[in-house]
Amino acid sequence: MGTCGKERKSVPELFGSSVFNDDVMQERLPKDVYQSLRKTIDEGKDLDLTVANAVASAMKDWAVEKGATHYTHWFQPLNGITAEKHDSFISPTSDGRVIMQFSGKELIRGEPDASSFPSGGLRATFEARGYTAWDPTSYAFVKDGSLYIPTAFCSYSGEVLDKKTPLLRSMEDLSREALRILRLFGDEKTKRVVSTVGPEQEYFLVDKELFDQRKDLLFCGRTLFGAKAPKGQELDDHYFGAIKPRIAAFMKDLDEELWKLGILAKTKHNEVAPAQHELAPIFATTNIATDHNQLTMQTMKNVAARHGLVCLLHEKPFAGVNGSGKHNNWSISTDSGKNLLDPGKSPAENAQFLLFLAAVIKGVDEYQDLLRISVASAGNDHRLGANEAPPAIISIFLGDELTGVLESIETDSVYGGVEHKKLQTGVHVLPDLSMDTTDRNRTSPFAFTGNKFEFRSLGSAISIACPNIMLNTIVAEELRQFADILGQEEDKKLGVLKLVKKTMKEHKRIIFNGDGYSAQWVKEAERRGLLNLRTTVDALPRYLDQKNVELFTSHKIYTEAEMEARYETIMEEYAKTLNIEALTMSGMVRQEVFPAVSAYLSGLADSVNSKRAVIKDLPCAAETALLTKLSALLDQAYAQVEALDLLLKDQKAMSSNVLTAASYYRDSVIPAMEALRATVDGMEENVSAEYWPYPSYADLMFRV
Ligand code: ADP
Ligand code: MG
């Protein structure tokens, strides 16, 4: 498609062709301008206005050559998606014409009228207007005729109103504390430490024509009804299965669009559920990975539309088959690319690795609640704990080998085949960890996979910013504590062993290598005192616990007011999401299901009457039984939809206290929706397919 007359570009030519990246900068910027910009990007140095003007002008020329007429400050408000407002480059001249102009000021700062973005009450208390500020660490790019400039979004009085600012802060913070550790190990060269992320993105594709027939998909992104198809995922025939031509065409197009944007799209395959797929990029720094994941999700939707498909990013589009998640592969590395979660080959590297590992273990245990909160949403509540995704209980999988090593350090004993004497003196070499090829535990929410951690609890639709803000900050805090202690130790290796030992003694409860789906684990986790925050409403209030407020305020990631705002926003979004779902459900039942079922019933009744007009006492057993059954279900559905509507009018649903409202939706509205759904699905199973107003699960999942 779209290649007629043009020569097809090779992938290296295509890659990054829409991005104002380092190559383009070097080529187009005067040397001194390029160098100042590079300093800003690499070291966070302020950019002066003359440099900004030169950059803006070069960017504009480049973008105009790529067909851009507009520019937009692209930002990431609290609602988890991205926002953009487009301004054209045109500037009038005295003789009534226009020229294309773009100034350094326009590049650096924007003033969207941003009063309608969620702010959790922050703007009411502070200052109404917000502004966007250029993030030069994420390259600008051209898309759909606009130059996109990645930006952070703040209020005029400085309150953070987005997800990028805290993410950048958390990266800085982690870098600072990790550097302290590296210095203690004698590394004087490393200037910066970055956290890296590779997010594996799951999604569903459905046919656009079928999608259009379902208001639940349109308004909620998921089906609210749907009797199970005879076949689901039980044969395991979709996972890694051959990709159908239509899907393959979509994936090819998607890869090309992503490559143009400089996104390292790498792996694609069919997932477990029918019509479910996955895309994984090669990892990047957390900031870039977050921007790229947002772009990936949007591009998936846009490209799907070109293929007559709709991409569903909801965490649970269909009951009865797996929902979609996002695996956040996270690690930390030096500016020269050395992965700090890689065990390494020498004893010194091992000691350093063990320290970083201990920091993660301690952090995840102390801040289980924050990690759980970072993935909380109404959509993701369908997955966590539903034996398809990791449980809501946060634990770490290390594998038997690494756990064994840590336990041997804890108890001063000897681990398996490891060099015995060295172990006792504390300068042992870790055994080669075979985990990355063998030991794969799919049920763990937080699994060590050889040289990185895979946080698996994320929902497919959420921004990865929040989980990574949490991870970066938590680990920064633990590294800070460790660096303080280790700084006082003369023998650093012994110091590391002491810290590892203490961490194991106090935090090993968080390590669990068994089956996270099992009922025993729920009991065992409770015995260990681990949190099991099953729903968003259970999890979220803990965000404002003293220890969490202390963490974020002391690391200057958020102020307490900003945290309250985030809490309000997420809790409110939960209630609003459920309200939309319940209203959609009610409308579908009243306006589409009732008329369809009643038409079918009257057809059945007509059939009985017309048959009996020929043969008077004909039993018509099937029709009468069906009439009775469906009539009863219809009555039941009516009572249930009436009840649901009443619930939605309750004061609690509209409470200005977000916790009251959200709890009410969870405790009263969700059960009412579930009951109504069961009845409607029962009708679907008994009504003629011709009468049923919606494409069935079988059509949606098997006819793509
Ligand atoms: P899986 O078997 O889970 O698919 P892969 O080895 O294919 O595992 O990696 C999954 C993701 O992890 C990819 O996006 C990959 O780029 C990412 N990844 C690999 N190394 C790192 C790292 N050091 N930091 C962050 N992500 C990484
Ligand atoms: Mg994975």
Image (tube, helix red, strand yellow):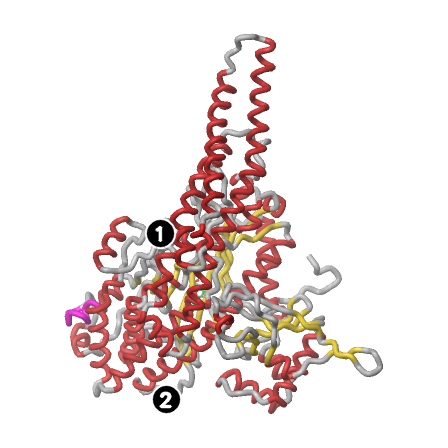
Q: In this view, does 415 lie above or below 656?
A: below
Please tell me whether mark 2 sits on a helix, a strand or a loop: loop
Residues under labels 2 and 1: Cα distance? 45 Å
**Residue located at (20% from left, 73% from top):** 502
According to the image, label 1 marks what residue?
A: 385
Q: Give the range drawn in magenta.
A: 407-414
Residue 564: quadrant of the picture? bottom left
Q: Visible in this render: residue 489?
A: yes
Q: Which residue lies furthest to the right in this view?
A: 95
- In which quadrant is the N terminus drawn? bottom right
Q: For the residue marked with disc 2, what is the amino acid?
A: Glu
Q: For the residue marked with disc 1, what is the amino acid?
A: Gly
- In percent of width and height, residue 457 lies at 39, 59
According to the image, label 2 marks what residue?
A: 188
Q: Which of 312 and 348 is in front in this view?
A: 312
**Residue located at (58% from left, 32% from top):** 596
| Within-10-Å neighbours for mark 2: few <14, some 14–19, many 20+ | few
Residue 499: quadrant of the picture? bottom left
